[in-house]
Every structure is written in structure tokens, then in C-alpha cells.
């Protein structure tokens, strides 16, 4: 008979509980209309990869991580002004400020 594996002592944090609570509280998805033929749907939560890619100076990678397959359609039709407006909209939707992104980089 195999010995039962005991949990390690100490404090334990279970992210599943926090994720479940956030999932219950989430609002409807956000859709950003770019053109008559292109709507972008943002995920309910901002992926950590978005901020990490931005901190590394990779805006394209950040948007690909956020938009997934939608990114190519956006890049094919977007101007620089569209790109700036999209980033502003993303920051508003997820309540992220440039200062927060910079602060997390300094940590």
C-alpha cells in the first residue's frame, strides 16, 4: 500500500478560486469596430503576455497575444492612427495606464 502524499506545510494560494470568482463577475465581451467589415473581440481578461510584450518593446507581439487570429486582419487594414486608437481603447477597457505598465517594468 502506497503512502498517502501529504501536502507541504505552509501557506497555500489557489489561483483557481480567484479565477472562478473573476469569471462569475465578468461582464459581456467588448467589441471594437475597426471597419464595416472588421470587429475585434477582446478577451474578458487582459493576458499577462500583453503587458510583458509591451515592456519588451514588442507592440505587435502584444497585440497578437491579445487579439489572436484577429491581429492579422487588423494589421492588414490599420493605419498608424488606428493603431494608436486601438491601444487607447485597450487601455480604457482593461483600466491600464502607461504609468502602471512602466511601474511593473521597474519592479
Image (cartoon, helix red, strand yellow):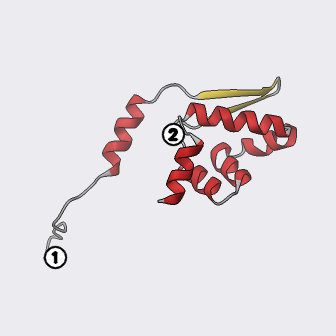
- N-term mark: 1 or 2: 1
Residue at 56 percent across and 51 percent down: it is 102
The mark tally for this picture is 2
Residue at 82 percent across and 35 percent down: it is 81
Query: Residue 63 at what x, y percent from top left?
Result: 69, 47
Query: Residue 14 at what x, y percent from top left?
Result: 29, 52
Q: Nearer the viewer, mark 1 or mark 2?
A: 2
Label 2: how many Cα within 10 Å (few below 14, some 14–19, many 20+): few
Give the residue at mark 2: 45
Give the residue at mark 1: 2
Return the residue nearer the eye: 93 or 2.
Answer: 93
Residue 5: image quadrant is: bottom left
Q: Secondary structure at mark 2?
A: loop
Label 1: how many Cα within 10 Å (few below 14, some 14–19, many 20+): few
Residue at 81 percent across and 40 percent down: it is 73
Q: What number is the disc on residue 12?
A: none
Q: Secondary structure at mark 1?
A: loop
Query: Residue 90 at what x, y percent from top left?
Result: 63, 36
Disc 1 + disc 2, Cβ < 8 Å: no
Residue 7: image quadrant is: bottom left
Q: Horizontally, is 67 left or right of 34 in the view?
A: left
The N terminus - image quarter: bottom left
Task: Give the vertical position of 81 relative to 5 (above or below).
Answer: above
Q: Horizontally, is 87 left or right of 28 in the view?
A: right
Task: Give the vertical position of 74 relative to 4 (above or below).
Answer: above
Amino acid at each position: 500500500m502506497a503512502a498517502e502524499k501529504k501536502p507541504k506545510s505552509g501557506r497555500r494560494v489557489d489561483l483557481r478560486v480567484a479565477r472562478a470568482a473573476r469569471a462569475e463577475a465578468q461582464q459581456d465581451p467588448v467589441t471594437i469596430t475597426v471597419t464595416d467589415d472588421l470587429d475585434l473581440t477582446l478577451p474578458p481578461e487582459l493576458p499577462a503576455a500583453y503587458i510583458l510584450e509591451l515592456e519588451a518593446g514588442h507592440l505587435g507581439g502584444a497585440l497578437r497575444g491579445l487579439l489572436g487570429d484577429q491581429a492579422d486582419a487588423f494589421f492588414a487594414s490599420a493605419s498608424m492612427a488606428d493603431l494608436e486608437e486601438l491601444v487607447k481603447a485597450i487601455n480604457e477597457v482593461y483600466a491600464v495606464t502607461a504609468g502602471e505598465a512602466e511601474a511593473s517594468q521597474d519592479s
